[in-house]
Amino acid sequence: HEKGILISLAPLSLLALDANGFVIWFSTVATWSLWPLLVIDRLCEAYVCCLVIFLCINAMTRPTQLSGEVTFLRSNLATVAAVLSLAAMLCLHFAEWRLVPPSHLPDLFPVLWSLLGCGLFCISYLATIWAMSMKYNTTSTKLNTHSKQRSHSSGKGWRKFFFLSYFGIVATLGEAFSPSTHQTIHRGVSYCSSLSAGKESDHFIPNSDHLERARVLLPWEEQSKKDSQPVLNLNLSAKNSDRLPLADGSDDDAVAASDETNTTPCSWEDGKVWRETEQALVALGILVKNDSDNESKELTREVIIDKVPQLLRLPTDQIVESASFFVGNSTEELPNLVLLH
């Protein structure tokens, strides 16, 4: 929360000369919202001292207006809202000091802090949107415009206010709840893991022979597995123990977890991993779609799966990286490249 509120408070400080009252109010609200966290860190005295010093300094200073007359939140309604919010914050402080929360609601005051803080932040958001919409209407008008022009400008301000508010909320929610596209980009090649429903029948379904052969480790996989095996330390063999101790840095729990992982059911047997790999290879121009009338010597999925069934389980990124590196070679040698790399 400290970093999140600082993202908006830091640029807001640039308006200290143009909207001094709003900056002071929002800074106070932001600091007040940190109270439950500051209590945990035992910074209560620092919290009180910093707030008092900050408010005293701002009360004694009168910043010079550099951009002309300031109209940002100078209405009586804004003043009343600021006073009421400050009173509510002080009341919560007093209630927490004098009252004891019930046993079944131990987090009563932190929750009240969150609710009031969220409400004040939402009000601040709407106030800044309103100020932006009104700024567009006052840039080309003069201070001596008649009441009819001001009324017309105010109507436009409301429309722009609601438009900007709606756009900001929709953009925020859209970014937060947008579904993942599962899209991978590699060397300018883009492919998506999801296919349209009309092409579901074209999916390759491996048979039992393919699955059985796919479980066989490739030579480089066997070597990698052998290299990852822990080394026995014969010099530190424990007495009264049937097991030889592992070398320094090896973890028995990690080895046991690795064994359990190797015995778990495979997630590639449904063909989803291969479908992503197939799309990537087609995008690279290495693999062609199966066609009953295709009489060319280009690789099809039946041919390549029959030669290297391990492609059913190998990670797509690993295959695409190797294929992109050797894309200058003949596509007929792709199975050999997979076996070697």
Image: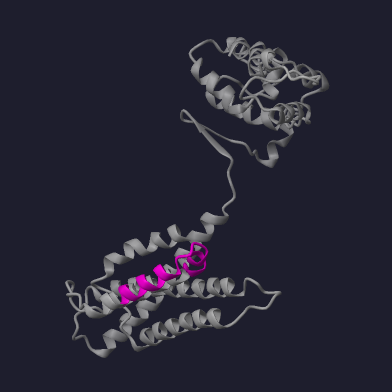
Observer-nearest of 274 and 198: 274
The span picked out in magenta is: 34-55
User: In the image, what residue occupies the spot 55% across and 83% down?
Assistant: 98
| Left or right placement of residue 149 versus residue 252 in this view | left
Query: Which residue is found at the position 35% from the left and 70% from the top?
Result: 50
Q: Residue at x 49, y 62 (%)?
A: 41
Please provide percent x and percent y for residue 190. Answer: 52, 33
Q: Position of residue 328 (x, y in %)?
A: 48, 13
- The answer to which image quadrant residue 154 occupies is bottom left
Tell me if residue 302 can be seen: no
Task: Identify whether 253 is placed above or below 321.
Answer: below
Q: Nearer the viewer, residue 82 or 265?
A: 82
Q: How many discs appear?
A: 0
Instruction: Residue at the far front: name it.
Output: 239
Q: Is residue 40 magenta?
A: yes
Residue 252's spot in the image, x, y percent? Answer: 71, 27
Q: Main secondary structure of the magenta part?
A: helix
Position of residue 23 relative to residue 195, above or below, is below
- Vertical placement of 195 versus 92: above or below? above
Q: Nearer the viewer, residue 91 or 300?
A: 91
